[in-house]
Image: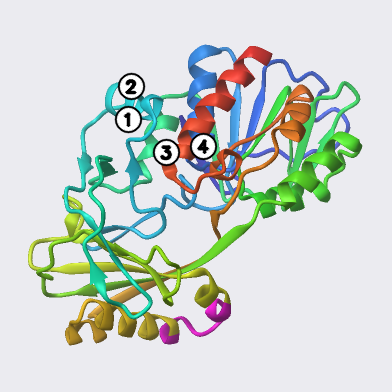
Amino acid sequence: MTVRSGNSFMYRQTNEKTMTDTAGRDVAVVGAGAGAAAATFVVDSAAPEAKITVLEKSGGLCGRAATRRRGNVTYDYGANYVKDEDERVVSVLTETLDTDGLVDIPEPIYTFDATGTVSEGRASESRKWTYRRGLTQIAKRLFGRTDATVHRRTRIATIGRTESKAWRLVDTDGVEWGPFEALVLNPPAPQTATLLRESEWTGPVRDALVEAVERVAYRTVWTAVLHYDFELDVPYYALVNPGKDHDVGWIAREECKPGHVPPGESLLVVQANHKWSREHYDEAPATNVAMLAEHAAEILDDERLHDPNWTDHQGWRYALPENGVASGPLDSTEREGLYCVGDWVAGEARVHAAVANGLDVGERLVSRL
């Protein structure tokens, strides 16, 4: 994998000869989430002659499976782990990729209700995996096994087609990319719909896809990260509110992940529910963090949690898809050489679902190439 940041390695179209109309086996991937990484891995493995260009708007990889570090603390502040509920994904993580640093979270997940009362959760046979260096390792390791070129901080503004029906892209800096035989779109459904709706590519196939993608509903999540210089003594890794009737939907303890938090410290990832997150999304972060710390103190029944010694935060406007997208419009656009990938395509807001969907899309794209 070649990773390039900024515009230093890009080219600008200065005249009609800058970009030819021959796509060959070139593939463009917009977005560098877990699904996109899996699709890229499959295509590169099965069609190594294909030239794959990944265009990611942010400075990171793996989308909402995001990791940050502060000093000697590592924390996953979006998706929390990947489950072992898909055999192909398990095979990728434990056999195909390097397993160095792959760790399991052994502690259970408990529940809490509308009053904040905590109860033991149901026993689960699923494993909860992450990496000592965080969940972003999934995309980093998948991309790292390919010859794809990843351009970060590159936001695509326009999708179009050449006279020979190859795909062309223009980013927000006016840089033109292409032509491409195939195009893979990985942004969340609302952003994908906007990109398609505002594209230069028009027609009934596109219109049907936009309509289908716009039907995917999302939950918004506002997250507070709370660090403490003491270690909590509780028997669970995380608490979840299954009834969705509390302002908080999830509280996780990063110290349960080997290698994330030094002994004697605690770090809570507190995620508000959809309603609270939407209502408070644009309020001052410090205010939101303080309110979520208060909730955490009440739910865990520990007054010390009112006063973290440092904090972080992140708003996820399009965090969790609540449904999938109709297969008919997806099939029609794939015949045009355009593929959608991600957990919203799978219809399940899980990292393993995004990776599994990426593997499926990659296999279908290979058959086209």
Answer with the quarter of the image where residue 98 lies.
top left
Q: Nearer the viewer, residue 167 or 186?
A: 186
Residue drawn at (45%, 73%), measured in percent from left and top?
Answer: 245
Check if mark 2's residue and mark 1's residue have beta carbons within 8 Å: yes
Residue type at the position of mark 2: Thr
For marks 3 and 4 on the same chain, the one whose residue lies earlier in the sequence: 4
Amino acid type, label 1: Leu
Residue 316 in the magenta stretch? The answer is no
* Helix, strand or loop status at disc 4: helix
Q: Residue at x 60, y 37 (%)?
A: 341
Split into 4 quadrants, where in the image is the C terminus? Answer: top right
In the image, what residue occupies the spot 82% across and 49% down?
197
Q: Which residue is mark 2?
A: 96
**Residue identified by numbered label 3:** 352
Residues at circles 2 and 3 in contact by the CB criterion of under 8 Å? no
Could one spot residue 14 in this view of the protein? no
In the structure shown, which secondary structural element does the residue marked by tag 3 occupy? helix
From the viewer's side, name the closer residue of 9 and 25: 25
- The residue segment tinted magenta is 279-287
- The residue that label 4 is drawn on is 35
Given residues 122 and 301, the one toward you in this image is: 122
**Residue 93: numbered disc:** 1
